[in-house]
Amino acid sequence: MSSPSKRRDMDVMKLMMSDYTVETINDGITEFNVEFHGPKESLYEGGVWKIRVELPDAYPYKSPSIGFLNKIFHPNVDELSGSVCLDVINQSWSPMFDLLNVFEVFLPQLLLYPNPSDPLNGDAASLMMKDKNQYEQKVKEYCERYAKKENVVGTPKDESDDEISEEEFSGQSDSDDEAGTQHLILARTIGLALHVISSDESNTAVSQSLVVLTSPEVNNGLRFENLLKAPAELLGRGKNGSVYKVMCDNPNMTLVVKRIKDWPISGSEFKKRMQKLDQFRHPNVLPAVAFYSSRQEKLLVYEYQNNGIQTGQTFHWSSKPSIAAGVADALAFMHQELQEDRIAHGNLKSSNILLNKNMEPCISEYGLTNIAEISTSTTACSSNYAFPITDENIGAIFKADIYAFGVILLELLTGKVQNNG
């Protein structure tokens, strides 16, 4: 049986892994705020609330304390304190429950099925029983006034529909205050359930371990406790996941961790792909130094790069041909070596061209897009980087990279990012 502290850490980790926005208080995990959205097909749909969670020392044997920080009109929520009247939390809590149950089951059920016979807000309960139409109107008024995104202050920036930009990937984000709310959480998220192994260890451990690829510097120092203690910043979010910057003391290096969400690829396929990419290295392709894969989660670890060709700096004409040549050489090499495996870049664009400490180009995120995803995305969008691909013409995935490279050349020549049209 796991100790309460380990169970507490695991439950917070699972909550983070499920894409809930979590703000820690005083860099701990016993008190934190969670962004909660009103359930669909309820009066509260579209509302956003910040929920304060406090975990007692005896958690999970004792229930968490839950409270709404912005106002909500509900018979079972105290309007002033935000405290919740919910039997499953207050009286019938069981160690079998976890924090995901609270946010995915208990709170949605509370908002879907209020109980006016056991109220904390007498006005709401009375109005619900006497005049349902007026009660529903009052609920919607409160949602409009108190439960908008702007009312939930202090949360990390919104997820956008755009890909993670190079500025976010290389740390050129201007949201330092937002990133600070995620300090230490990444280290716990990665470290608590994982240990570091080299890629030649037992395959049975891969689903539960961070696999370090062929990098002597990292293999000699990167360990479970290093990641656990390392400060981490949330650099940005996109439709494909989140990017974090991690500052390690041992080894003394700065890493970038990309967390990929909703990638329809099995753990074994992901492992094979990462090892294949590691097998064929090119100096102008940014290699992953480690990866992790589970049923719910995929993480990639890279060395941090300070610059990119979209950081706003002006390039002298003499440097542009070498940048273009480096990218072209890298693409030609990777295409030749990985053609049989049908692993192209799939998402090549100028924001994915980083610059190392010698100001040499490095293609980032190579091979992180599935054939099915490429086929779907290129036919569903009008991006200037997109080349039409169909299931009957699957070899065109490599042509799509060449097409995108042409757009990058145009951007290098003009100094302007190409807009649609």
Image (cartoon, grey):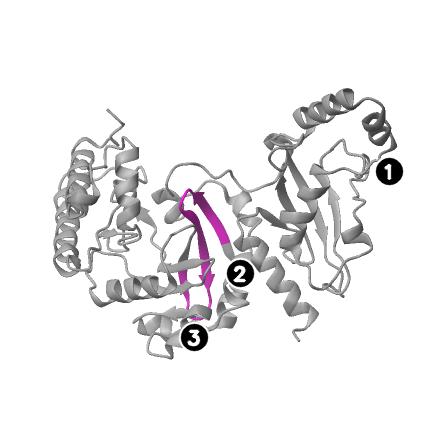
In the drawing, does residue 117 fall left or right of residue 36? right
**Secondary structure of the residue carrying numbered label 1:** loop
Left or right, 295 with respect to 53, comes to left
Q: Nearer the viewer, residue 342 or 234?
A: 342
Give percent across and percent down for residue 385.
Answer: 23, 37
Kind of residue at disc 1: Ser
Instruction: Please tell me in which quadrant of the rendered image residue 350 appears.
Output: top left
Q: Which mark is residue 54?
A: none
The one of 54 and 222 positioned closer to us in this rendering: 54
- Give the dominant element type of the magenta stretch: helix, strand or loop: strand
| Lower position in the chain sequence, tag 1 or tag 2 | 1
Indicate the position of residue 65 as horizontal and vertical percent values.
76, 52
- The nearer-to-camera label among 3 and 1 is 1
Please state the horizontal and vertical placement of residue 109, each as a whole percent of the image: 69, 43
Q: Residue at x 77, y 34 (%)?
A: 74
Between disc 2 and disc 3, whose residue precedes? 2
Which residues lie in the magenta part? Answer: 233-254
Image quadrant in which the C terminus is located: top left
